[in-house]
Amino acid sequence: MNQNINDIQKNSITYKKELAWLNDLIEARFKQHFSNKLINESCFIPPHISGDQSKYANWVKKLGLDNFERLVIISSLAYEYSSNTFDKFLIKNKGLDKRFTEFGGKVDDKNSRFIPTLETLIFLYYGNEVGSKFKAQSLFNDDHVFNKNGVITLSLKTENDSVLSRIISLSEEVIQLLTLGEEYKPDYTTEFPAKLIKTEMTWNELVLNPVILDEIKNINTWLLHKDEIDESKVLSKKLNKGYKCLFYGPPGTGKTLSTLLIGKKNNKDVYRIDLSQIVSKYVGETEKNLAKIFNIAENKNWILFFDEAESLFSKRTSVNDSKDKFANQQTAYLLQRVEEYKGLIILATNLKPNIDTAFSRRIQSIINFTMPDLKERKILWSNFLKDIAEINREIIQRLSKDYKLSGGSIKNIIQFSWLLAKRNGTEISEKIILQGVRRELNKDGKSIDSI
């Protein structure tokens, strides 16, 4: 808590310096505009913040923002936190009885506030220089630092709007960093249909075949040395900047838990993508929904986890009608975004044959999560029963030998057994566990007698 307060105080110091610069620039530009008084060149130079220890100052230095880009940032923040900064722009042209169109901007009639647009900021920094209006549009290029880092968003285009007349807003991530000094962790919304997932379990509790664990070590090694690849001109040319994995196998074999433990070990957030909110029957909507995910996740070092990935990464088909054509375009777009993502993407599926082969060629690790063998099942039964019930080794040996179950199924059985024992006011016994086994097998249309 104290650290958070400290970050806020440091950010506020930098903010006040930038705000004072913005106010001085507004004052100077208005004097020049209405009295033709020359502006001192020093007004265009933002304050020195290299000595500031704030997250705000460090972020500006990290991105290498130029003077005009810094003006965009402080103007957007000022509108949110010091909106009276722009009151001067509400002045009317008495001769025409309307606002000065050269100021750009919009007016929030409800709150009588002036809302700066890119045109406003161009006026402030460049005056009426036409060439600057052309140049300023580069802020919206895909390769601009703002777009590469998801810094700004534009208001929706309305009738007669130009690019310069749309309102610039900072992303929630940037606002949170420059004010509270906190790392942005988005909540699940329709704009970001992904959920941050975690686990309290540890690697010691994950029971996997040694071959699978060896493949997971490769993933951990890549995460450990990822920055080395990014920073090396030689490695970045010859190695993929991102890493893509396919985890496939029956349900309950550890695909999700392995993903979570990879994130936990490497201090990376894991976001599970809600494919029900991504895939749309309407043309172009799936691509738009995917773009929201990748645009927000870009440069965050998050692990993106696509569970039940076959619904999104399915094989392309021969084009027989317009639906096939658009479905194939959707897959092509997804291939492109997956290829460009610089972090770790993990696809999980129970149906590997349904995954498009084009994805397979772009995947660095394809790991088959097999059903646990006898030895692994004994460890799973022992681990889940530990500190919950006293079941002797002979019973555990028998359960492990007689029933070929996944770790997820064993966990379900233990949970059912614990609840049934609580209902009956008894301890967990072999009889109760067998009831749980029967119940779990019934889910797949099997019975104890058929095994």
Image (cartoon, rainbow, N blue to C red):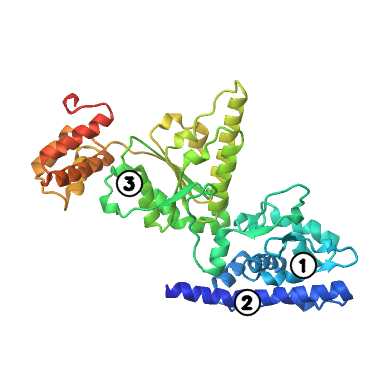
Image quadrant in which you'd find residue 444: top left
Name the residue carrying label 1: 90
Q: Name the residue at 15% across, 36% down.
A: 434
Image quadrant in which you'd find residue 380: top left
Q: Is residue 276 left or right of residue 84?
A: left
Name the residue carrying label 2: 16
Q: Position of residue 210 (x, y in %)?
A: 29, 44
Q: Is residue 2 left or right of residue 75?
A: left
Q: Position of residue 159 (x, y in %)?
A: 76, 47
State how far apart marks 1 and 3 are (Cα). 65 Å
In the rendered view, tell whether residue 188 sits above or below residue 27: above
Q: Name the residue at 68% across, 58% down.
A: 168
Relative depth, front residue between 4 and 382: 4
Q: Is residue 265 left or right of residue 285?
A: left
Numbered disc 1: secondary structure: helix
Relative depth, front residue between 131 and 369: 131
In the rendered view, tell whether residue 253 sits above or below residue 178: above
Identify the amino acid type marked 3. Answer: Leu
Which callout, 2 or 3, points at the residue further toward the start of the chain? Answer: 2
Q: Position of residue 278 (x, y in %)?
A: 52, 40
**Residue that sits furthest to the top in the current view:** 320
**Residue that sits furthest to the front in the current view:** 110
Instruction: Indicate the quadrant containing the C terminus: top left, top right, bottom left or bottom right.
Output: top left
Identify the amino acid type marked 2. Answer: Lys
Q: Nearer the viewer, mark 1 or mark 2?
A: 1
Name the mark on residue 213: 3
